[in-house]
Amino acid sequence: MSAAPPGVLLFEGGTEEKRLAAATRWAKTVNCPQKKDGKPCGECPVCRQIDARAYLDVWYFDGRISNKEDEENPGVVAALRIENIRKLKAAIGVKPHGEGKRIAIIQGMYSTREEALNTMLKTLEEPGDFTLFALLVPQRQQILPTLVSRSLCLTLPWESSASATDEKFRPREDSLGEFIEKGNAEFLDQVAAKGEFDAASAADLLTACQRSLIRAVVNEPRSVLDNSLMAIARAPERFALCSRWLAEGQEMLTLGVTPARVLEALGSRLYALRRSC
Ligand SMILES: [Zn+2]
């Protein structure tokens, strides 16, 4: 994915800490000069500086910092005030210091004033070749739809859907992963088996799939399903397609479409998409 990174990534879900960690990892993935298998090394000067928030090409903004605070006590994280956004906008056409990309990590956008927000929107519209954006919000509904539509949205796992369901779901996840990878019929049999999936457990599997997609995109695969999505997650268009299908699947389930049909359709689409990678 770092070969052609998406221009605007939106990280939602998880906790504030986890969103920041995911964006930081992404910044390292884009900028680390010593990547191994697409993963940042975590040890080179670039990775270490990014971890220490001291890398010149990673900029931090937070709409919750007041303009006064920012003026009196400017820190690593800048307020989203118009002067700062203009600085970012001016820097956009300029080559970054390092060999990678300049990354603007932006939090607290929902509390940004309208004037600053408009400038921000214009900045995002013309990101140029050197700059990428990471927008961090609890939920995408908290920011303007025009911003969301420009972004590749990554939903981190919500705190409540933690490991309890993980164990129960692992076999189902595994068989979906194997199906995507090799087209094994086991998954289709499982889906068609009476009583195997109701709407809730099918929705859980879609959520698990979404989590896997995130782990794939940040290069931290842990399961068969994660691995099966690695190639898909690398290309932004395929990633976007996959996210959309998962969202559509959830919607169909809430509309009362038979869970087996939803999962079958999703599995087949992902299988075909995997073949096209
Ligand atoms: Zn590195």
Image: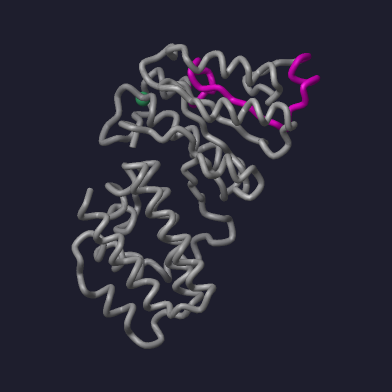
Query: Which residue is the extreme one toward the bottom?
Result: 194
Question: Whole-percent x and y of residue 177?
Answer: 29, 62
The boundaries of the magenta stretch are 50-72
- Report the side of 138 relative to 103 (left or right): right
Q: Is residue 200 left or right of residue 139?
A: left
Determine if the magenta segment contains residue 57: yes
**Which quarter holds ligand 1?**
top left
Residue 171 seen in the current view: no
Query: Where 94 falls versus 6 (above or below)?
Result: above
Q: Quadrant of residue 226?
A: bottom left
Camera-nearest residue between 135 and 196: 135
Left or right: 152 with respect to 79? left
Q: Nearer the viewer, residue 130 or 215?
A: 130
Q: How many marks?
A: 0
Q: Residue at 53% across / 75% down in the picture? A: 255
- Check the image and report above or below for 145 versus 72: below
Q: Is residue 94 left or right of residue 13?
A: left
Q: Is residue 115 magenta?
A: no
Instruction: Name the foreground residue: 82 vs 58.
Output: 82
For the N terminus, give its image quadrant: top left
Q: Residue 73: image x %, image y %?
A: 75, 15
Residue 206 x %, y %: 44, 64
- Locate residue 145, reporting x and y percent: 60, 45
Residue placed at 64% from the left, 43% from the top?
143
